[in-house]
Structures are given as structure tokens and as C-alpha cells.
Image (spheres, rainbow, N blue to C red):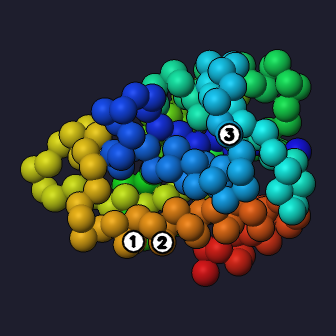
Amino acid sequence: MKWIVGLGNPGAQYEKTRHNIGFMAVDELARRHGIEIKQSKCKALIGEGMLPGGKVVLIKPMTYMNLSGEAVRAYMDYYKASLEDLIVVYDDLDTEIGRNRLRYQGSAGGHNGIKSIIQHTGTQTFNRIRMGISRPEPGFAVVDYVLSGFAKKDKPLLEQSIQAACDALEYSLDHTFEQTMAKFNG
């Protein structure tokens, strides 16, 4: 069973922001497969379902981005879930919008949600899909940028990125993450 954690911030004011692209991808995967993400458990909203590749649990931490590791740790401890079965989906400033990068390890790269997960799991080795949001224009504060919405011109690239992330997640259910990286990092 895979457990997929989309990172974001709870609340309507954050719903369509760049920082919530991980939530957007998990919500789209849930929509594709008729999974409801509404059970409140382990400091997160959780939905379970069957996909063609197997059982999956979709998780949206409700701790706010900077404390995402609390929900990941709580889920791991409660369900005795293995880190090998985890995939984290989140926004990445260093990848251009419309592109995704899959990795199985690495530093937080300045991302506080990933930093929290690394702190709470004690490792940098876990599967991840970094969804590009591009960097802000010079002079635009990063914190304001990630908490702002996508520009109208970026909507087609956003949709492309979300669909590609979902395709990769589906593929990963019955392929190794290395095979998934080879196919979707292209």
C-alpha cells in the first residue's frame, strides 16, 4: 500500500496558492478515482481507495506547511507505515512551472515542509515529486510569492503539471520509483 502526502496549507485563503500545488495534485488523484479525502486522523485529512495498481492512502496534512512532518510521523507511527511506500508531492521554486522532478532523496532545499518531514523521519531518503512553481521576479519576497495564486497565463502549465504528477503517481503503484523517475523525469 502506497501512502501519498500532498503538502499545502489548510484553509480557503490558501486553496489556490502556489504552496498548495501538492494538495491540488492529491485532490486531482482523488477525483480521478472517486476517493473522498475527509477522514480527520493523524493531524491530517485522509482518504483511502483502490487504484488499478493497488491500495492507496491520500494524505493532506492539516498542520500548515512548516509542520508537515508532524502529520507524516503520526501516520507512520499509528499505521506502522513504511517510508519506502511514501511519496511526497510538493511545490518547488527551482523547477519551472509546468514541469515536475521526481527524486528519491535529497536535502530540503529551503522547503520548510520537506525540512519538517526530514526532522520527523530522521532521513532525507523518501520518494518525492517536486512540482515546479518557478521563482518570483527579483524584488518579490519568496514568502509572498508562494502564498499567492497562479497567474492566469500559468493556468495551462499548472494543469499540465497536476495531470503529469497524477500520471506518475498512478504509474508508481505497480512500478519501482526508479522506473517511475526514468519515465516521468524525461
The front one of 108 and 93 is 93
Q: Residue at x 45, y 67 (%)?
A: 159
- State the quadrant of the N terminus: top right
Q: Residue at x 52, y 44 (%)?
A: 23
Measure the alpha-carbon separation of dots 1 and 2: 5 Å
Q: Residue at x 48, y 72 (%)?
A: 160
- Amino acid type, residue under disc 3 in the picture: Glu
Going from the N terminus, do you reach mark 3 or mark 2 first?
A: 3
- In the image, residue 69 sits, relative to residue 185, either above or below, namely above
- The percent coordinates of residue 5 (x first, y second) are 64, 40
- In the image, residue 89 sits, relative to residue 5, either above or below, namely below
Q: Residue 36: which numbered mark, if any?
A: 3
Where is mark 1, residue-wise? 157
- Amino acid type, residue under disc 2 in the picture: Gln
Where is mark 2, residue-wise? 160
Query: Is residue 37 left or right of 3 when viewed as pictured?
Result: left
Marks 1,2: beta carbons within 8 A: yes
Q: Residue 63: which numbered mark, if any?
A: none
Local crowd at mark 1 within 10 Å, few (<14), some, or many (≥20)?
Answer: some
> Is residue 155 at least partly visible in the picture?
yes
Query: Is residue 106 left or right of 155 when viewed as pictured?
Result: right
Measure the alpha-carbon separation of dots 3 and 1: 26 Å
Task: Nearest to the eye among marks 3 and 2: give it.
Answer: 3
The front one of 136 and 52 is 52
Which element is circle 2 on?
helix
